[in-house]
Amino acid sequence: MSWFESFILGLVQGLTEFLPISSSAHLRLTAVFAGWHDPGAAFTAITQIGTEAAVLIYFRQDIARILSAWFRSLTDKELRADHDAQMGWLVIIGSIPIGVLGVTLKDQINGPFRDLRLIAVTLIVMGIVLGIADRLAARDETGGKHRAIKERKSLKDLSVKDGLIFGFCQAMALVPGVSRSGATISGGLLMGYTREAAARYSFLLAIPAVLASGAYELKDAGEGHVSWGPTIFATFVAFAVGYVVIAWFMKFITTKSFMPFVIYRILLGIALFVLVGTDTLSPHAGQSAG
């Protein structure tokens, strides 16, 4: 991998990680359309550490508050009813599904899950799911001629059951094309949470999963055509771009619909099906040499 390739892929990772359009799919597709080798699951996982560092900085006050309350609640029973202490446990509980499935499905993640036909399917299907969830949220928030405005849930309403559902939604993102934020935000909206609450928990929930995944994949970094230098460079690029994107996205969702992302996902999925169906692209393009 050249330094130019690593810069572009780091840029793509930073731009797409927090948007509900799947960063892993876009890294895969960027390499395919540019005629490069598939950067692989290890490169993807490690560069996600960069974007996760952006989350740590952006939500630093929330994270510090949650960690402080959670650690103190281990010895102070009265603090166990505190919302921040409970959030610490809910992030841990919500991280269990992706931890278990990530290890169990490692071979599939590195192989069959990177098939362009599967990516096309997940882009379209999850785009439709996100669209439905967004419509339901909009209906509750605006009401209608014969419908009163319905109050949606905040993170203070988050339960262990809902945390696990969020966790299973996040685990779906092991398949490129699903999108970690897209799946968890869709799940949150379908469970009746506000856009802001669903997005905030989605990003907090990703922290242990992404950091653990990146650390686990470190042993595979530098193998094949992807060397350490470009991987680290791409990770720093992803961090810088990701911080700007997350700040923009958190403001965007307070007033805007997810429909532009829905339309983009569906159109991209259809285009990918056409390219593969007409043999313009091989469903395994770039993988054999990657």
Image (spheres, helix red, strand yellow):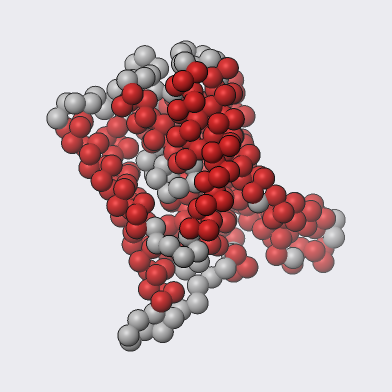
| Residue closest to the far right | 75
Up-down relation of residue 21 to residue 77 (above or below): above
Question: With respect to residue 15, does 62 lie above or below?
Answer: below
Observer-nearest residue: 53 or 44?
53
Residue in view at x 38 percent, y 73 percent: 139
Residue plotted at (39% across, 35% down): 26
Q: Where is residue 274 in the image (x, y as percent from the top left)?
A: 18, 36
> Residue 32: percent from the left, percent from the top?
32, 25
Residue 41 shows in the view: no
How many numbered callouts? 0
**Corner quadrant of residue 175:** top left
The answer to whether residue 154 of the structure is visible from this angle is yes
Q: Quadrant of residue 122?
A: top left
Asked whether, in this view, residue 215 is left or right of residue 124, the answer is: right
Left or right: 251 as drawn, with respect to 20: right
Asked where in the image residue 66 lies, by quadrant, the reply is bottom right
**Farthest residue, direction left:** 278
Quadrant where the C terminus is found in the figure: top left
Q: Which residue lies furthest to the bottom in this view?
A: 146
Where residue 205 appears, x then y in whole percent? 58, 49
Q: Residue at x 70, y 49 (%)?
A: 60
| Residue at the spot 48% in from the left edge and 49% down from the top edge | 181
Q: Position of residue 209 (x, y in %)?
A: 58, 41
